[in-house]
Image: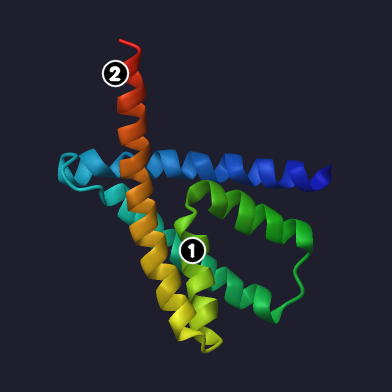
Amino acid sequence: MLRFFVIALGGAIGTLLRYIAGGLDYRFSGGVFPISTLVVNITGSLAIGFLWGIVDRFAISPNVRLFVFIGILGGYTTFSTFSLETFNLMRDGEYRIALMNVILSVILSIGAVFLGYFVSKTLLNLYK
C-alpha cells in the first residue's frame, strides 16, 4: 500500500511540473511550436539518465526509486522512460532492438494518434 502512495505522490509532483512547463509554448513561441513538450522530453530524459547513473552506483531504496522514476518522472514525461530503455539496450549492445524500439515507438504512436482520432470522429458522426 505504501508503494501506491509513494508513486501517487511522485506522480502528483511530476504532473504539476509538467503543467508548469506547459506555459512555455505561448511564452516563447506564441503557441506555434510545441516547445514545452520538447523541453519536458529533453529535461526528463536528462534527469532520468543522471539519476539512473546515481542509482546504478549507490543502494537506493525501492520506494525512493518508485517515487522518482515512476512517480515524478512518470508524471512529468513517459518519454524519459522510453529514452532510458533505449539507452540501456544500446549500452548492452542491442543496437537492432534499440533501433526497432525507436522506429516502432515513434511510428506506431503517431499512427495510434491518427487511428484514435479517426475512430472518435467516425463514432461521433454516427451519433449526430
**Residue 79 image-quadrant placement:** bottom left
Discs 1, 2 touching: Cβ within 8 Å? no
Question: Which residue in the protein does label 2 denote?
Answer: 125
| In this rendering, position of residue 7 left or right of residue 121 | right
Q: Which residue lies furthest to the right in this view?
A: 1
| In this rendering, position of residue 80 left or right of residue 115 | right
Identify which amino acid the numbered label 1 is placed on.
Answer: Phe
Q: Residue 48 carries which label?
A: none
Task: Classify 102 as above or below 66.
Answer: below
Describe the element under mark 1 as helix, strand or loop: helix
Instruction: Choose the circle earlier in sequence order: 1 or 2.
Output: 1
Task: Classify 124 as above or below 11.
Answer: above
Q: Residue 82 carries which label?
A: 1
Task: Classify 8 as above or below 93.
Answer: above
Dot 2 crowding, Cα within 10 Å, few <14, some 14–19, many 20+: few
**What residue is drawn where x is 40% and y is 40%?**
20
Dot 1 crowding, Cα within 10 Å, few <14, some 14–19, many 20+: some
Indicate the position of residue 82 as horizontal and vertical percent values.
49, 63
Of residues 79 and 63, the one nearer the viewer is 79
**Residue 45 image-quadrant placement:** bottom left
| In this rendering, position of residue 20 left or right of residue 92 | left
Identify which amino acid the numbered label 2 is placed on.
Answer: Asn
**What residue is drawn where x is 75% and y is 41%?**
5
